[in-house]
Image (cartoon, rainbow, N blue to C red):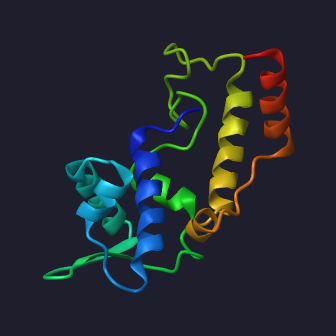
Amino acid sequence: MKLSTKGRYAVMAMVDLAQQSAGRPVALADVAKRQEISLSYLEQLFAKLRRFGLVKSVRGPGGGYLLSASAEQTRIADIVLAVDEPIRATRCTPGSPEGCRGNHERCVTHQLWEALGGHIYDFLNSVTVADVCNGRIRPTAQVAWLEESRTAVGE
């Protein structure tokens, strides 16, 4: 599964907002510059984040955006879902009568990918913006082992 730029950029921008805010609104232009994301793209994402209730906007001089809740209460899964990013590892739409293969049937590995999507959601729902800001996300032992083994074989 690969998150599109919508999900990744929204998370990056929300983490930037949490790091830079100190209780004051942060201008999207500043976030765009620091994170090297198009301002117009960020404006679209933040409109969705605002509608979802994750950020609030402050108008006027010195205006910008603030997190609606604390970084400790803002879950990564909510950010990803707010920008219409599906959290699943299969291309099927849940409950779709078309199935994975477009012929009303599920592929033979559908349950595997559906379960993986559930694990991805559970993980993202367990991580907050504060966790990311404070570096509390560590690769699992399996990921670390895989990286070490790839390095050992010269990949």
Q: Position of residue 144 (x, y in %)?
A: 81, 39
Q: Is residue 103 above or below residue 13?
A: above
Is 3 situated left or right of 116 in this image? left
Q: Of residues 85 and 59, which is closer to you in this image?
A: 59
Q: Of residues 63 and 112, which is closer to you in this image?
A: 63
Q: Quadrant of residue 149?
A: top right
Is 73 situated left or right of 109 in this image? left
Q: Of residues 102 and 31, which is closer to you in this image?
A: 31
Q: Position of residue 92 (x, y in %)?
A: 53, 28
**Number of numbered discs visible in the structure rendering:** 0
Q: Residue at the location (49% across, 16% down)?
A: 102
Q: Position of residue 19 (x, y in %)?
A: 47, 71
Q: Quadrant of the N terminus?
A: top right
Direction left: furthest residue:
60
Q: Residue at the location (76% across, 16% down)?
A: 154
Q: Residue at the location (35% across, 57% down)?
A: 34
Is 137 situated left or right of 2 in this image? right
Q: Residue at the location (44% across, 37% down)?
A: 4
Q: Is residue 50 above or below residue 88?
A: below
Q: Position of residue 108 (x, y in %)?
A: 71, 16
Q: Quadrant of residue 137?
A: bottom right
Q: Quadrant of the C terminus?
A: top right
